[in-house]
Amino acid sequence: MLEALLAAFVAFTVTFVGLRLVEAGYHLVRRSPDWSPHWGSWLFAVLVGIYTFVMYYGR
């Protein structure tokens, strides 16, 4: 179970950081300020973490 939690945390972190970097790059290219609350990045990263936990724990 600890391995599944660790895998879920890593998946969440990598997904969230990756999405934030892509979004920051997009705003850098467009030269526009970033006013979004980033709830989409959080939600998607949480869903990836849950999916990873369920798939890893089921093995």
Image (cartoon, rainbow, N blue to C red):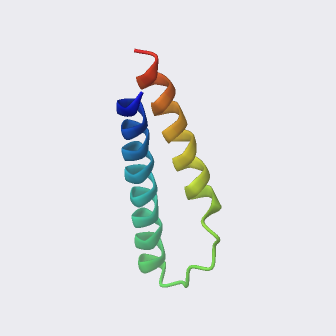
Number of labels in the image equals 0
Relative to the observer, which residue lies in front, 39 or 32?
A: 39
Q: Residue at x 42, y 45 (%)?
A: 9
Relative height, residue 35 to residue 57 (above, below): below
* Residue projecting furthest to the front: 2
Q: Quadrant of residue 38?
A: bottom right
In the displayed structure, does residue 46 sit left or right of residue 16?
right
x and y percent of residue 43 in the render?
61, 51
x and y percent of residue 42 in the render?
57, 56
Q: Quadrant of residue 57?
A: top left
x and y percent of residue 3 in the render?
35, 31
Q: Residue at x 46, y 56 (%)?
A: 16
Q: Residue at x 40, y 71 (%)?
A: 25
x and y percent of residue 52 in the render?
45, 32
In the displayed structure, does residue 38 sit left or right of residue 2?
right
In the displayed structure, does residue 39 sit left or right of residue 48?
right
Relative height, residue 20 to residue 10 (above, below): below
Image quarter where the N terminus lies is top left
Relative height, residue 22 to residue 8 (above, below): below
Image quarter where the C terminus lies is top left
